[in-house]
């Protein structure tokens, strides 16, 4: 299976704290994407980082990519209760997205 | 961003019936759409790639006769779960690919419950 792994599987923090999620993958990639999924809903695209990029920012999100270690991290700064969701990384291989196992983030007020 | 819709959002059916799920790209044309299924608290697993005007490409282990896919136009792909059984109960999500970076926009999902 090409499916990546994410850790932690679950993360509970307080509002205002930062949340860091990690993703590891197995094969060479063209790019890596992060998605958010609220419970029972579809996925929302958060950010895409190309294989030749090392870091990318979007609002309160910061994504890093280390292709030598085949890993990526997603940092959410100053978290809010509305950030409560599952977060998935996805890599592009053979024109298809392969999703990681996901991190369930709970942000308490 | 691009908008993808799914219909219905939720369906409950009896075992043995067939269920059709529609996936539409609302403001763009999608030559390629994807169908995923997701079990509770698990990740998305790709079922098949749907190409407009041609047969779908199924992932290993997915029965093509069980999960019929038709991509009849550039804005519509349908997934029909034939002779549904309780083990087919799941969350089915479609997506449409846009642009050169394989960015995908996802529908809101369809919750299928087979009694």
Image: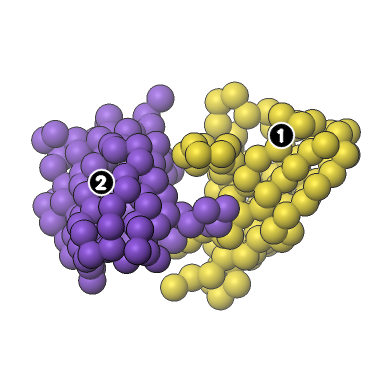
- The subunit letter for the residue under badge 2 reads A
Q: Are dots 1 and 2 in contact, CB under 8 Å?
A: no
Residue B107 image point, x, y percent: 57, 59
Q: What residue does disc 2 label?
A: A21
Chain that the image shows in yellow: B
Residue A43 image point, x, y percent: 48, 56
On the picture, is A45 further left or further right than B48? Answer: left
Does residue A8 appear in the picture of this structure? Answer: yes
Does residue B95 appear in the picture of this structure? Answer: no
Q: Nearer the viewer, residue B87 or B41?
A: B41
Chain that the image shows in purple: A
Assign the N terminus of chain B to one quadrant of the image: bottom left
The local secondary structure at tag 2 comes to strand
The label shown at residue B88 is 1
Assign the C terminus of chain B to one quadrant of the image: top right
Residue B30 image point, x, y percent: 55, 62
């Amino acid at each position: 299976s090409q499916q990546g792994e994410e850790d932690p599987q679950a993360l509970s923090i307080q509002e205002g704290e930062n949340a860091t999620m990690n993703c590891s993958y197995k094969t060479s990639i063209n790019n890596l994407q992060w998605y958010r999924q609220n419970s029972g809903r579809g996925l929302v695209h958060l950010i895409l980082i190309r294989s030749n990029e090392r870091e990318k920012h979007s609002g309160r999100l910061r994504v890093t990519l280390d292709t030598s270690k085949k890993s990526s991290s997603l940092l959410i700064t100053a978290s809010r209760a509305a950030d409560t969701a599952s977060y998935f990384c996805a890599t592009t291989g053979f024109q298809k997205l392969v999703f990681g196992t996901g991190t369930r983030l709970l942000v308490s007020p | 961003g691009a908008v993808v819709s799914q219909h219905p959002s939720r369906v409950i059916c009896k075992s043995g019936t067939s269920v059709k799920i529609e996936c539409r790209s609302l403001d763009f044309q999608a030559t390629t759409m994807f169908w995923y299924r997701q079990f509770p608290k698990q990740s998305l697993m790709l079922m098949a790639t749907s190409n407009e005007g041609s047969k779908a490409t199924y992932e290993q282990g997915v029965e093509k006769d069980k999960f019929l896919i038709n991509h009849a136009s550039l804005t519509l792909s349908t997934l029909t779960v034939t002779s549904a059984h309780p083990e087919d109960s799941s969350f089915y999500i479609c997506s449409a690919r846009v642009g050169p970076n394989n960015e995908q926009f996802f529908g809101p999902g369809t919750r299928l419950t087979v009694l």
